[in-house]
Amino acid sequence: MTACQRPGCTGSIDDGFCDVCGMAPAPAAAAPTPVAVAAAPAAAAATTGSARTDPISTGSVSSRPTTGSPLSVRGSRTSSGGSMSTRTGSSRGTAASRRGRLGAGLVEVPPVPVRDPSEAILANPEVAERKRFCSNCGKPVGRGKDGQPGRTEGFCRECGTAYSFTPKLVPGDLVGGQYEVLGCLAHGGLGWIYLARDRNVNDRWVVLKGLLDTGDSEAMAAAVAERRFLAEVEHPNIVRIYNFVQHPDPKTGTLVGYIVMEYVGGKSLKDLRSARDSDGHLVPLPLDQAIAYALEVLPALGYLHGEGLLYCDFKPDNVIQSREQIKLIDLGAVRRIDDDESPTYKTDGYCAPELATVGPSISSDLYTVARTLAVLTFNFDYLGIYSDRLPDPGDVPVLAGNGSYYRLLARATDPNPDARFESASDMADQLVGVLRETMAVADGEPRPALSTLFSPERDVFGADPDRFPTLPSAAEVVAALPVPQVDATDAAAGLLATSAATEPKAVIQSLSASSLDTVEIRLRVARARVELGDVRGATKDLDELAGRVPGDWRVTWYRGLVALVAGRAQEARDHFELVYGWLPGEAAAKLALAFAEEMAGRPAVAAHYYGLVWGTDRSYVSAAFGLARVRLSGQDGAAPDKAAAVAVLETVPKHSSHYVAAQLAAVRAGMSVTSTALTEQDLVNAGQRLEGVELDAARRNRLAIEVLEAARKWVVSDPRRPAMAVAGKRLLGCALTERELRLGLERHYRSLARLSDTAEQRVALVDRANSVRPVTWV
């Protein structure tokens, strides 16, 4: 143990946190792969108490993503007004729930060997005095005094309630005539956990879980409820329940209930999180590994929710990794969703703030998953000042460096339950997107995936090489961005899927004549108005929809498009930031936000978002052109970085239909500086890049003229350059001298003249050829 680092505190860091103030050790300077630490499986600690409801601290940090809690957006809703999940059958979420191994096929999670059950038995089973509290009033009980140890059984001095922290079973006891007790494994808020051997089924190892305090009526009721619920549970990531038996209390003879469940050998996430660095600081788990654990847990919680059950008390203690499998092991707090009477069990630091007043819900279960992710991935005072909110991302490197991860945690732990994820599959879907992005940023390898919330890019904006690097128009961007997918449950989904109208005016006319008036019809009409540039009409449609389906994120998305068309870049940025906060795993939100930031004159922030999108998924080619464009514009007062712009454009794959456009844009990017700043190599590279792409004769001649003219200006800008020309270095067949470059220009002008459509064009080009040719005697 080490001394607590909080000024004035006399406690010690034990089991990861101070036993007096609850403070975690200072954040570690580095985060290497944690060292496995042997420990027995632990039962859930169920504590009670109120939680504060302070809002999540958010704010913008210079040139990095602006963070914010998306309180003004909700999941999309059906036309009847009922809540609809933001997910309509995600391929990402489905993959997470059906894969055959831990890590979603993306992460290599170190396996944890199955532990020999006999090695997990506690040599001296007892509850530490600091963990003894009255089950009725919560006051400390069983504490030592004057050097004497505290009593393990007795009565609370405050309210008189009996307490007992003594195991009721001892090695050799035969419970239910079938299960031979071998010893205690662990203890927790709802009971002791014993290791036993099933005499009737091949001496298999089983776990018996009984009550910590048999005099506690609420705990007894919880055990009975647990027996009823767990008989219905069957999921590969949830511990199996074999039986429920009774055994007399050794002192009173009262029958005590025990749940018989499978033994899961391995380590809990709390154990895996307990490794320390050389300075004694707790080492957070690698981000991708922690997300992999959450992606394994969410389908299990989703299964419980689908069965009408709530887990209520999720935390690292209650998850065991055995080999490459994850299991929820303690379901003592499980209750039915419609149960408003049973006692609620929770753990401070993990539970949602409304649990004590409103009660548990699906969103409060998901809240605990996000809090667990936070505890696993960075050190913070989650039991104290941050017991119900996240630290500012600027104070936590893993959050500052992973804006999408922060936004996911912020949404899942929003103080407003209605602003959180609506289902475990919704959260898993976005978490997979965040994981793909996180891993792509870490190793530079894209990890694309189809979205079920947005279509692919409909076109690529900013890809016209003749206009590069000019900022594309808002209309061009609106026409190219992905669009929200149609809700398949909407009554008009079939009509929209089969409609032949694509031109905006035709769409409005066709849908206005329809007898259907659904949310999807209204959204499609609003989109058509945006594409026509009808700001007033689109705004009116969206205002009506906002009243009809409050908080629908798609309304916020289209408001962002309206703001783009209207030229209100900051307003567009605010709308897209909300959508990003709501859907942190979606590339479409970040792509739209990137352009809004670029339009608003913040190239560094735009480059960040363009880079996230392009680095994760190379199908969003607009992001490549956008990133190259902002690199050429300069950032934070720095000079344009043509080398970085060219490097981005060269990553457009050869199989892309925009490969040639990217290569031609790279030609222009390489010569996008003044003549004096150009280098000989810049010119040679541009010529080689031009020679390497297949173009029609007219375009090739026009671009060759552009390159040769830039080279001519470069040569004449310094009188010494003709004498410095290196033999053998040629540009499009010309030596780097003014005479050779003029001859090359003349040749390409004449070739272009022969390809011209009109006599006027031909004469103009011939005149230009004559004017540029070097002076000769003939």
Image (cartoon, helix red, strand yellow):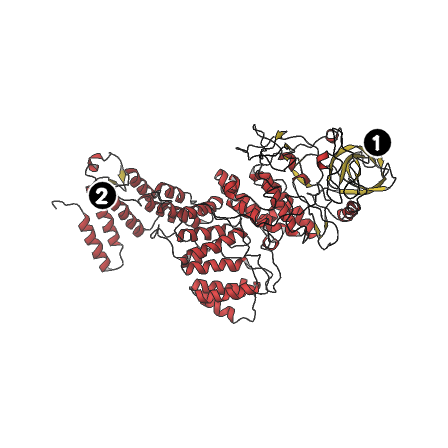
Quarter that holds the N terminus: top right
Spot occupied by residue 140 in the image (x, y as percentages of width and height): 73, 39
623 or 555, which lies in front?
A: 555
- Number of marks in the image? 2
Q: Residues within 10 Å of mark 2 (few under 14, many from 20)?
A: many
Mark closest to the chain's N terminus, 1 or 2: 1
Per the image, label 2 sits on a secondary structure element best described as helix
Amino acid type, residue under disc 2 in the picture: Leu
Side of 160 relative to 747 (left or right) = right
Q: Is residue 499 visible?
A: no
Relative to 401, say whether 549 is above or below. below
CA separation in Å, label 1 and label 2 = 98 Å
Comparing labels 1 and 2, the label whose residue is closer to the camera? 1
Return the residue at label 2: 741
Find residue 172 and name its label.
Answer: 1
- Give percent across and percent down for residue 753: 24, 54
> Between residues 136 and 277, which one lies in front from this camera angle?
136
Q: What is the x, y in percent for residue 653? A: 43, 44
Q: Is residue 709 above or below residue 502?
A: above
| Above/below status of 451 relative to 291 | below
Q: Quadrant of residue 721?
A: top left
Q: Say which amino acid is labelled 1.
A: Gly
Relative image position of residue 191 (x, y in whole percent) = 76, 40
In the foreground, 19 or 504: 19
Looking at the image, which residue is at 72% across and 55% down? 338
Q: Residues within 10 Å of mark 1 (few under 14, many from 20)?
A: few
Rendered residue at 48%/70% (across/down): 509
